[in-house]
Each structure stands twice: as C-alpha cells, then as structure tokens.
Image: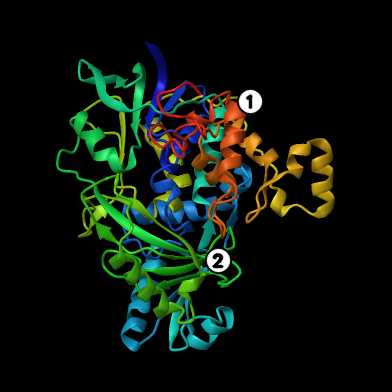
Amino acid sequence: MKTFDFIIIGGGVIGCTIARSLSRYKLSILLVEKESDIGMVTSSANSALVHAGYDAVAGSLKAKMNVAASPMWDTFAGELNIPFRRCGDFVVAVDEKEVQKLEELLTRGKKNGVPGLKIVTGDELKAKEPLVNPNATAALWAPTGGICDPFAATLAAGENAVMNGVQIALNTTFESFITENGRIIGVHTNRGDFSGRWVVNAAGLQSDAVMHKAGVRPEFKITPRRGEYFIVDREEMKINSVLFPVPSDVSKGILVTATMHENTLIGPNAQNIDDKEDKSITAKGMDEIWNGAKKLVPSVNQRSIIASYAGLRAGGNAPCADSSVDYTGDFVIEIPETVMGLVNLGGIESPGLSAAPAIGQYVVELLKDHGEQLIEKADYQPIRPARPRFRHMSMDERKEMIQRDARYGRVICRCEMVTEGEIVAEIHSPIPATTYDAIKRRTWLGTGRCQGGFDMPLVVEILARELGKSPLEITKKGEGSEYLYRKTKTVEGQPA
C-alpha cells in the first residue's frame, strides 16, 4: 500500500488549489479524482466570475474567503499564466424598489471590506454598457469584480502542483476511510488502498457523503443546485463587464457577462434537484434564462445562441461561521475534533471559485494551528508556464512557431483557430488530455459556431495516434462515451 503525507479527495478547483498550496512544503501528496480528468464537474461549468465579495453574508466564512481571495487573484493568475481580467461588475436596478436593494448590498459590501463600491446612475451605467436596459435607473459598481477561465484555473493549479511533486490519480473513486484507534490513516478506492497521515475532503457535490463516512457532521447535506446557461456568438454581441440583476434570496440571478473567450455568457438559473449528476437542460429553464437576460439586455437575439449547457453547484446547509449571525448555507472548512487526520470541506458553492486561492492558504494555516510542521521546499516553483495559443499570436509569431514545429501550421478547429501542435502539447502535458472534452476544455476547440462538427474526426485521429490506441477506444469524456462503434464497411460479427 502506497503511503503519503496527504491524500486529497477531489480534483476540482478547490482540491487542485489546496494541492498547489501544500506542494510548497516537503510533503508527499496524492490527489484522487473519480472522473477521467480534473475539473469535470462544477469547475468546468459555472459563471467564470471572480466576485468582489459584497453579496456574501457579513460574518460568514464565504464572505471572509471571498474578500481575502479577491486581491490574491492578480498574483494567482500571473504565476499560473491563466486568463483573468478585472472588468468590474454592475448590479442593475430597473425600479426604485430595486434601488433600495442596491443600498443594502452597498452596506453589506462595505461591512465585508470590499473596496471601491459605489452606486452609479443609469446614465453612468449606459455609458459603460450601451446595450443595457434603457430603463435601468441605477447600479452598484464593483471595480474589483472580474472574469476568468475556471477550468484553466483548475488545470493550472493542478499542473503546478504536479510540477512540485504532487501525484494525481484519475479514474480513482474514493470508497471509504481506513481508520485505526479513532484516526483516519488512509482511504479505500476502486484502484486499491492508499495510506496517509491526513486526508482532505474536497469532494464538492459528494463532500457530504465523504464526511459522513468519517462520522463527521451527520446533519450536513449537499443539495445539488442546477444552473443552465446560453453562450452567444462573439460576433453578435459585446458586453464589457458583468451585468447582474438585483439578487434573490437563493441566487445572484441570471446574469449577462463578458468572458475571457470573448463570447457573452447568459445564466444561470437555480434549481434545487436530487440527482448529483443531472446536468440536463430544460425548456422551462431556457425560457427562464432568456427572460432574465432580456431584462438586462433587451436587444439580445436568440439566433445568436451557439450553445447551451448546465452546471451543478454544491449547496450546503451549514450555519454561519459567526454564531451570532442567523444564516444557513456557509462554507465548511475545518479540522474536526471528533476524528483525527481529516481536513473537511463542504458546501463550497459560489463564490467558491473566487475564494479558491484563500481557501488553499486557509487550509495550510489550519494545519499549522493543529501542530503540523510544514517545512518549505528550497526548490518550490510557483510559476506554471503557459503553452502557446496560435489564435492569440501575431503573424510573425505564428511563422516562427511553424518553423519550429510544422504541426502548428495545421489548423484543426477553424472557428477557434486551434492547431494540431496545440492539441499534441495538451496530450503530453503534466496532466495529459486523453479525451475529446479534455482537449476542448484546454484549448477551447469545438466551442465555436460549428460546435465541433469539423474538428471532431481529426481530434479522434490525433488522440489515437498520440496515445497509441485504436480510434475505437477514443472517448468524448471517459469510458462509456466512445465515439466509434466499428470501422466503415465492417460487417458486425466478421473480421475487419
């Protein structure tokens, strides 16, 4: 049985960021992820926002982590070479009742310590966002709000952790804990047992099931909250920042936002469901999103939509970290007194992505407070180099790249200008891309107008060649999602 200092359960942005934070120290670390790639659940299907921190309830761990993390994002994104932009965000009011809500958010934001907040007039808003509803009367402006690529953040944190010695085991499902004399000393998985001095529960939607197997917080429950989205063609609509409606009690509302990929993103709604894997989209949900978008940007056109999808958030029912505050739904980040050897996280829904850099640091401080001796590595490398992106190069840079590697001269995805060289680089990266969707998340291939109609057969061919597999073995997102059943003209039951 392999032995590690730390075993992290879950390869979303929280698990990968914690892995990166711990990789600074002289520790052996294993991250286990049940899917075929990291970041396949919440971390690759969300609103891609770095929230300023005015929405979270004052005194909550959510608020503290969000506000602490916000100024960390410049360094976090810079070291990892990932897309990030502080474009700011507006909460848009369209009547006087909603203006009163802006005042409440402003007060809460100031209490949370969010800098630069102010209420602007409708005219000031329209000067920055010409497409906004002409009936908008005022807006709360948060200059520290931003946008990022959430999967890129997850991947880069995970890759940087691997660069610093962390091992990642994909297709590896946590089953139960190994305990001895009241202490967790390892985990059982579908791929064998692993021992560890500490186990970190960063299992996202499954975090309640994991903690219950440790006998921790039996009353805690994750409620999957599904959010549906539209993506609008970048040539059809231009939003400069993030537009929020005035929020409800359960959601920040259906937003219209710029993205790092230059498309406009619309959504999400918020539907509490029972199935932790149900990412289906619904006609009712699509109508709800569309009506919400029209409230913010009346000119948006349905013919401009190029894709729709749904994501899941891990809503929890933990009381506020500040016991004097009457609020349920806070983050859980703790080392429980009832069981030794566990770092327990749960209910890390929005603003979990925004808070991730601070959560990683918070876990390190918790461990130090509990007597863990953490010795920094002399050779720790915080920089994760970016890989070339042909689409963003100048003509001279492209020419030079093609001279070095001719595969960068073969365009595989025309919509997003992704080349064979980029695909091959991702297949052989620190966390290898071995499925079509893994390539898609890393390069944005297949996300344009044709939605992969042109590139998919070519990507299957490249994956098969580089992985030394038959094209029949290449999958969309892991085992059970194979693209091809047989070779053309092969008769079933007879030799090819």
Residue 253 appears in view: no
Tally the marks.
2
Indicate the position of residue 481 as horizontal and vertical percent values.
41, 37
Q: Nearer the viewer, residue 450 or 31?
A: 450
The alpha-carbon separation of the residues under discs 1 and 2 comes to 44 Å
Decide: few, some or many residues near mark 1? Use Cα within 10 Å; few <14, some 14-19, many ≥20: few
Which SS class for mark 2? Answer: loop
Q: Nearer the viewer, residue 175 or 332?
A: 175
Extreme-top residue of the structure: 1
Figure quadrant of the N terminus: top left
Q: Is residue 405 left or right of residue 440?
A: right
Q: Nearer the viewer, residue 124 or 224?
A: 224
Residue annotated with mark 1: 379
Extreme-left residue of the structure: 219
Indicate the position of residue 69 as horizontal and vertical percent values.
47, 51
Which SS class for mark 1? Answer: loop
- Give the residue type at disc 2: Asp
Of badges 1 and 2, nearer the viewer stands 2
Indicate the position of residue 270 as horizontal and vertical percent values.
30, 61
- State the residue at coordinates (45%, 73%): 302
Q: Is residue 439 left or right of residue 296?
A: right
- State the residue at coordinates (45%, 82%): 298
**Contact flag, marks 1 and 2 (Cβ < 8 Å):** no
What is the number of the mark on residue 233? Answer: 2
User: Which coloring applies here?
Assistant: rainbow
Residue 103 appears in view: yes
- State the residue at coordinates (57%, 34%): 160
What is the number of the mark on residue 277? Answer: none
Q: Is residue 13 left or right of residue 218?
A: right
